[in-house]
């Protein structure tokens, strides 16, 4: 089954709450915690606590409406803009951002963030800190030259992108074009922190099966190099779970710095 018979995330949309329950929840039958929660959070904590990532303005372009990938960033960046392809994800995020009834419960991830930072006595402050750092949640469209037309954003000091490129790209050419669009939002000397699922060809959200462009570690490294990103750091974690709702083999975390 190829991308013509799988649904496309950015075209068809998905059940945003079902996606969170499947891959990021605290439910007993949620088997992906090591790969989808703990590994990314540990990597982001390591990078942002190292002092190697500096600036004031950060953009997040990630799959779904997860927020746990931004805790560590919010300690350093007090001006965060989130770009989303789907209105449902924007609505889900706004429900959490404004602490509305029915907002998704991220307490298990705020607890994990506090534990990483050794600040468990400040547990309640983690989500408050992140909320106060998020300035806007905007719709984006990579089919347009200006991905957030008609608005304009300043170039970012840092961009976080988690699991999005492989699900919106049908082939190598589209992956390169989409990666280039992300890099264009980054200022010279800025850093892209990317999380990717390696060797995945499909994933499920609820009963719906979605396309994923199959990539490996060398492909991503080469893509970074071709588009002028110098790799500062990378790590790979082999899959830690058994499930047939997604077929990735490993998680990749990679940091690339844009040339001056």
Image (cartoon, grey):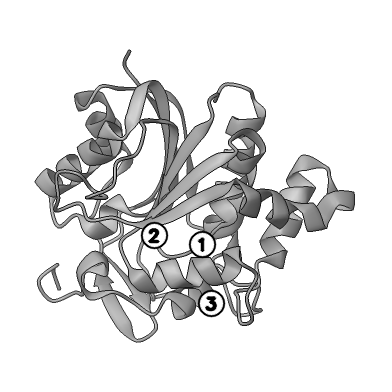
Graded by Cα atoms within 10 Å as few (under 14), some (14 to 19) or many (20 or more), the crowding at tag 2 reads many
9 w.r.t. 254: above or below: below
Q: Earlier in the sequence, mark 1 or mark 3?
A: 3
Q: Residue 66, which numbered label? A: 1
Q: How many marks are shown on the rendered structure?
A: 3
Please name the residue that numbered disc 2 is placed on.
Answer: 63
**How far apart, in angstroms, are the residues tagged by discs 1 and 3?**
11 Å
**How far apart, in angstroms, are the residues tagged by discs 3 and 2?**
14 Å
- Check disc 3 and report its element: helix, strand or loop: helix
**What x and y, as percent, mark residue 190?**
41, 24
From the viewer's perspective, tell me whether residue 179 is left or right of residue 125: left
From the viewer's perspective, tell me whether residue 152 is left or right of residue 177: right
- Check disc 1 and report its element: helix, strand or loop: loop
Please name the residue that numbered disc 3 is placed on.
Answer: 21
**What x and y, as percent, mark residue 98?**
61, 67
Q: On the image, which quarter does residue 123 sit in?
A: bottom right
């Amino acid at each position: 089954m190829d991308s013509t018979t799988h649904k496309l995330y950015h075209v068809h949309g998905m059940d945003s709450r079902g996606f969170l329950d499947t891959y990021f929840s605290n439910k007993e039958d949620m088997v992906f915690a090591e790969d989808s929660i703990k590994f990314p959070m540990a990597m982001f904590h390591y990078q942002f606590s190292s002092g190697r990532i500096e600036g004031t303005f950060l953009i997040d372009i990630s799959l779904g409406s997860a927020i746990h990938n931004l805790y560590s960033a919010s300690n350093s960046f007090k001006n965060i803009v989130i770009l989303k392809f789907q209105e449902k994800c924007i609505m889900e995020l706004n429900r959490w951002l404004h602490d509305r009834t029915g907002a998704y419960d991220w307490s298990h991830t705020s607890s994990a963030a506090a534990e990483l930072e050794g600040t468990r006595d400040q547990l309640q402050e983690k989500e408050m800190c992140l909320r106060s750092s998020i300035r806007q949640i905007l719709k984006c469209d990579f089919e347009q030259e200006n991905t957030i037309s008609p608005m304009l954003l300043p170039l970012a000091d840092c961009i976080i992108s988690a699991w999005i490129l492989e699900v919106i790209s049908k082939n190598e050419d589209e992956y390169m074009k989409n990666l280039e669009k992300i890099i264009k939002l980054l200022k010279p000397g800025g850093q892209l922190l990317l999380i990717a699922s390696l060797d995945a060809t499909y994933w499920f959200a609820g009963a719906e099966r979605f396309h994923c462009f199959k990539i490996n570690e060398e492909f991503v490294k080469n893509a970074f190099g071709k588009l002028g990103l110098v790799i500062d750091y990378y790590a790979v974690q082999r899959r830690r779970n058994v499930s047939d709702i997604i077929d990735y083999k490993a998680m990749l975390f990679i940091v690339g710095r844009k040339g001056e």
